[in-house]
Amino acid sequence: MSDKTSNQMWGGRFAAGPDAIMEAINASIGYDQRMAAQDIAGSRAHAAMLAAQGIISDSDAKAIREGLLTVLSEIEGGTFEFSTALEDIHMNVEARLKEVIGEPAGRLHTGRSRNDQVATDFRLWVRDQLDAAEQGLLALIRALLAQAEAGADWVMPGFTHLQTAQPVTWGHHMMAYVEMFGRDLSRVRDARVRMNESPLGAAALAGTGFPIDRHMTAEALGFDRPMANSLDAVSARDFAIEFLSVASISAMHLSRFAEELVIWSSAQFRFVTLSDRFSTGSSIMPQKKNPDAAELIRAKIGRIFGANVALMMVMKGLPLAYSKDMQEDKEQVFDAADNWMLALAAMEGMVKDMTANTPQLEAAASSGFSTATDLADWLVRETGLPFREAHHVTGALVAMAEQKGCDLPDLSLEDMKSVKDTITMGIFDVLGVHNSVASRMSYGGTAPARVREQVARWKELV
Ligand code: ARG
């Protein structure tokens, strides 16, 4: 860090420089340098507009625009010397621009303020992250579709209360997550549409007397339009909060799936084998293969939702327009974005690599009286019993099987008839898990044919 002081930017009315502690609490350059590319893109668009409107000369605009590219290459090449005294990325870039091109650099800040500048940079940065999240979600959804297609008719237990409930198919379970991540994807796309308006040209808060063209800069930066109210433009951070909300919901979905993978890969379940590439060993217990990636994904929701809460707390109660509190928006969003992208990529990798242990899945699906509902449904269909009564009869049969230490299909016809004499051999057709899942043909049901329809529908979409 160099010892440049802020005075060259705003020191006109200041006799002394800031206390070291003031500098430490005030500076954001330590993290907002991540927005360098966005800052320079915004400044280049602004300079071009100033020249097009006759506010600065073409030659000054040219010098500014080229000089900014030089600064960008210094930053990207790692040779740029960031200064804490220059507070933030905006003043660091402008100060360096002055060193590179001299006097014309001083004309860049005409008709704008750091308030609209930072709002613009941050919107551009968050927009890039929404685009990255879209790609991450698409990749994860494709990995899940491949699993669903391969295992459309593999049978596994479906749970409620983590107790065996009814047999379902592996493909159906995978497709449940496709639906969840698909909604995350649509939230990402919605958020992008809503946030894609340009704050640039709102200036400090009230707009400017210079004849700027905000439509021109908005278009140059890929925004759909300029924001319509300058006070709102510099003080709105709901776009960042919405990003964090969308990220939180997605991280919650990732966490639920991660938890299932932790359970499924345990020695007690053995439903899946995670690849060595996404597992770790223990330094003391040689037999261990731990699902660390899944556990870390499960935990990421903590910091991501924490960021969401933190930014809500920063923003609540702030009067219009800009307050320095709002500088506290960035680190939270940066951290949440990094960890969301990482979690998406790690989950995609795990899903691609994992192997379903199909014999174990089927054995588990067949135990725990998982076809009791099929039995009750059979009694309704074939003997005309009201469902409530069929439920009662089935309960008695489950109790009998439990007492005999066997499963429902292991009961003899005589055993069955001793509970309900209208039962016939036909009942055994519905007690097998494959018949059970195949019969669940209601729309959205677990039948392999239904799962394949959904896989085909999603393949069209992604
Ligand atoms: N570093 C500041 C931030 O992140 C830039 C805006 C500063 N504006 C001001 N009026 N001090 O919010």
Image (cartoon, rainbow, N blue to C red):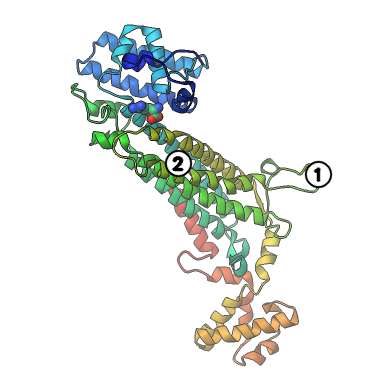
In the picture of the structure, the residue carrying the numbered disc 1 is 284
Image coordinates for residue 205, horizontal then vertical, percent: 26, 31
For image coordinates 73% across by 78% down, the residue present is 406
Where residue 405 sits, quadrant-wise, is bottom right
Return the residue nearer the eye: 30 or 340: 30
- Residue 422 lies, with reference to residue 89, above or below; the image says below
Q: Is residue 451 left or right of residue 311?
A: right
Give the SS element for disc 2: helix
Q: What amino acid type should be assigned to the residue bearing mark 1?
A: Ile
Image coordinates for residue 74, horizontal then vertical, percent: 47, 14
For image coordinates 43% across by 51% down, the residue present is 183
> How far is disc 1 from disc 2 in space, using C-alphas?
40 Å
For image coordinates 21% across by 16% down, the residue present is 55
Image coordinates for residue 210, horizontal then vertical, percent: 19, 21
Where residue 216 sits, quadrant-wise, is top left
Earlier along the polypeptide chain: callout 1 or callout 2?
Answer: 2
User: Ligand 1 is in which quadrant of the figure?
Assistant: top left
Q: What amino acid type should be assigned to the residue bearing mark 2?
A: Glu
- Residue 402 lies, with reference to residue 165, above or below; the image says below
Return the residue nearer the eye: 420 or 229: 229
Return the residue nearer the eye: 17 or 71: 17
Foreground tag (1 vs 2): 1
Image coordinates for residue 222, horizontal then vertical, percent: 32, 31
Where residue 43 sits, quadrant-wise, is top left
On the question of residue 462 being in view, the answer is: no
Disc 1, ligand 1: is the CB inside 8 Å?
no
Q: Is residue 281 left or right of residue 181?
A: right
In the picture of the structure, the residue carrying the numbered disc 2 is 134
For image coordinates 74% across by 82% down, the residue present is 404
- Residue 31 lies, with reference to residue 258, above or below; the image says above
Give the SS element for disc 1: loop
